[in-house]
Amino acid sequence: MYRLVQWGHMINDITSQARDKMRKCVDVTRTDLSSIRSGRATSALVENIVITAYEGTQKLKVMEMATIAVPDAKTITIAPFDPSTVSDIVKGIQSAGSGLTPVSDGEIIRITIPQMSQEQREEYVKLAKTKLEGGRIMIRQVRQEAMKDLKKGEDDGLITEDQEKVGEKQIQQLTDEMIAEIDSLGEKKEAELMQV
């Protein structure tokens, strides 16, 4: 009886750990995708840009230095907490290679999102697909680790071969669910990118 409880716990622990790690992979992929410009204004386009502020003494993300707002679909406004950092933020966004052009009125920074060409949209779709494949690879690596843990449990005599197969089936089902979630994120992002 104890051995049954033990193997059940082992498989549940491995599955639970794999689920947590895979969930993190999906979250990382979602964050990566949100940073891809889609022709619509979103705070994610600027919030993680690192700015060198206070005469080079500190490196901070825009979201740590200012309030970011999206008043309409084509505009981002950035209101720095410290007005002396306006020029630092403008320079940082310009040098980040984001393709955004910030304009400052001295207190508030405005960024108007330009219309994307079909060629740019296709380039961003390629970039999104690369990031999605990265997410799938991370999930497969987690699956591989979990499968190794199950195999080790069987090799060490903690679980039987049949129990290992049950665990492998659960891990594969979890992997399929998470990859389907990443595919769904990709479909949404592609539709968003191709929307004119």
Image: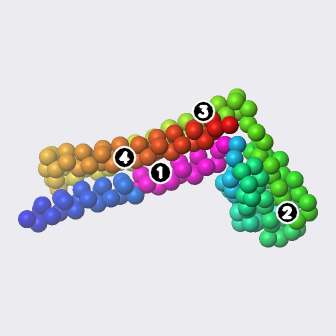
- Would you say the residues marked 1 and 3 are in contact, meaning their CB atoms lie under 8 Å apart? no
Front residue of this view, candidates 28 and 143 = 28
The amino acid type found where label 2 is placed reads Ile
Front residue of this view, candidates 82 and 69 = 69
Spatial CA distance of label 4 from label 3 is 23 Å
**Label located before the other in sequence (2 or 4):** 2
- Which residue extends farthest left? 1
Q: How packed is label 1: few (under 14 Cα within 10 Å), some, or many (20 or more)?
A: many
- Would you say the residues marked 2 and 4 are in contact, meaning their CB atoms lie under 8 Å apart? no
Mark 1 secondary-structure assignment: helix
Range drawn in magenta: 21-38
**Label located before the other in sequence (4 or 1):** 1
Spatial CA distance of label 1 from label 2 is 35 Å
Q: Mark 1 points at which residue?
A: 25
Mark 4 secondary-structure assignment: helix
Q: How packed is label 3: few (under 14 Cα within 10 Å), some, or many (20 or more)?
A: few
The amino acid type found where label 1 is placed reads Cys
Q: Name the residue under label 2.
A: 108
134 sits left or right of 92 in the view: left
Of badges 3 and 2, the one in the foreground is: 2
**Which label is found at residue 126?**
3
